[in-house]
Image (spheres, rainbow, N blue to C red):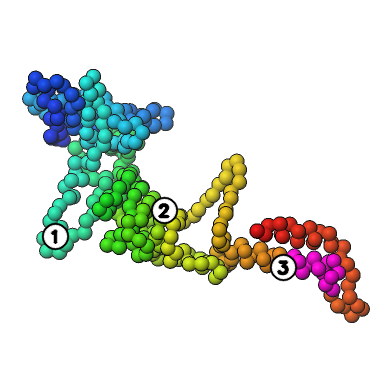
Amino acid sequence: MPTLGEVEITANRGSTDTNSEQPTGLSILQGRVREIFLNEGTNHSNGRIEILVADGANEDEGNKYDLTHAFPLNIYDFTLPAINESVMLIKDETGRFFYFSIPPVNFYDQLTFDNEDDTGEEEEENLKVNLHSYKNFSVNDDAETEIYGTTFTEDLVTATDVVNCRNVHEGDKVIQGRFGNSIKFTCKNELNEAPWSLDGEDGKPVIAIRTGELPDENPTEDNSFIYLLSDQSLDLGEIAFSPESSTIGDPMDTYVGGQVIIGADRLTFLSKADDISISSAGLVSIATTKWAVDFDVLMDQVKALATQLDALCAGTATLVTGVGPTGVGTNTADCAAIVSEIEGMEQ
């Protein structure tokens, strides 16, 4: 029987007493991940893992565990654990194990109701999602940098150690990864501090998709984000964006209503096979550090310029020279076609 050494699995008794005379049903156990099965060429996984589990039949034998396989409980929505992490297991009637991931055991050591340090000052909560006891476990003894799995290297552990667990408010639902990516389903509530909590009606839905290390939403600090708002404005913090066109309505950081806000250091829209269409019931504004224009004003000016040029070329408007007015331009037909095409864009 394999043993787990210094790392013990606790509270591993199944929810069904296998020694009783009651019919056997589903057993719920706790296991420890021993290996992740990866494709040798791509390092991809279909979710199959190897686990150490203490089943009810072996609990009297001390620190001994069965080595077996487990599969995701929900193949449509699952988290692939890392080696040595804990999983909850469901054992079906055929003896097969299905798992869903739970936080590392060290994670719970961070949770406390006493939030004061030795000096009596309140400590700031800083829950890490990647806190593990690495000293008790090493997978690749011959590879110094691969301490936690085939591709979960020491450099990756160090890089992701700064990632904090997402904060949520009452009623929120969050889907978060260990690398600083998350989707939060929440709402506007004036009692909860958030970038969207200033304006709008309480209870209106908000979806926040973002990548960043911080536990709270921060457009200034997050690497990239998408906010889907229904009746709110969004505080963009200290982001220094280019000024918008003076003819547009409420600026982007004060507009209240249903809107989608996308932000990052760079945005790229790529159409591989067909068009990109932008349609607006109001204005379409584009601002850079040099120009701030909307398409209505721009096209009005282009149309006016083309009309004046056409008039000059057609002779309906003339240039006065020292020897008299000029004649009809040789490009009259071309100018007329330009004016007609511009007029065709007008709604």
Asked whether the residues under the numbered discs 2 and 3 touch, taking CB atoms below 8 Å apart as contact, a structural biologist would say no
Instruction: Specify the segment rendered in magenta.
Output: 304-318
Please tell me whether residue 20 is drawn above or below residue 220 in the rendered image.
Answer: above
Asked whether the residues under the numbered discs 3 and 1 touch, taking CB atoms below 8 Å apart as contact, a structural biologist would say no
Q: Amino acid at mark 2?
A: Leu
The answer, for residue 337, to whether it is visible in the render is yes
The quadrant of the rendering that contains the N terminus is top left
Residue at image x 55%, y 47%?
Answer: 270
Viewer-proximal residue among 173 and 29: 173
Residue at image x 26%, y 54%?
Answer: 169
State the residue position of label 3: 304
The quadrant of the rendering that contains the C terminus is bottom right
State the residue position of label 1: 116
Label 1 neighbourhood size at 10 Å, few (<14), some (14-19), many (20+)?
Answer: few
Which mark is first along the chain, 1 or 3?
A: 1
Tell me the CA gap for discs 2 and 1: 37 Å
Is disc 1 placed on a helix, strand or loop?
loop
Label 3 neighbourhood size at 10 Å, few (<14), some (14-19), many (20+)?
Answer: few
**Could you tell whether 199 is left or right of 134 in the image?**
right
Q: Quadrant of residue 274?
A: top right
State the residue position of label 2: 228
Tell me the CA gap for discs 3 and 1: 70 Å
Q: Amino acid at mark 3?
A: Ala
Residue at image x 73%, y 67%?
Answer: 305
Tell me residue 271's x, y (percent).
57, 45
Label 2 neighbourhood size at 10 Å, few (<14), some (14-19), many (20+)?
Answer: some
Viewer-proximal residue among 288 and 311: 311
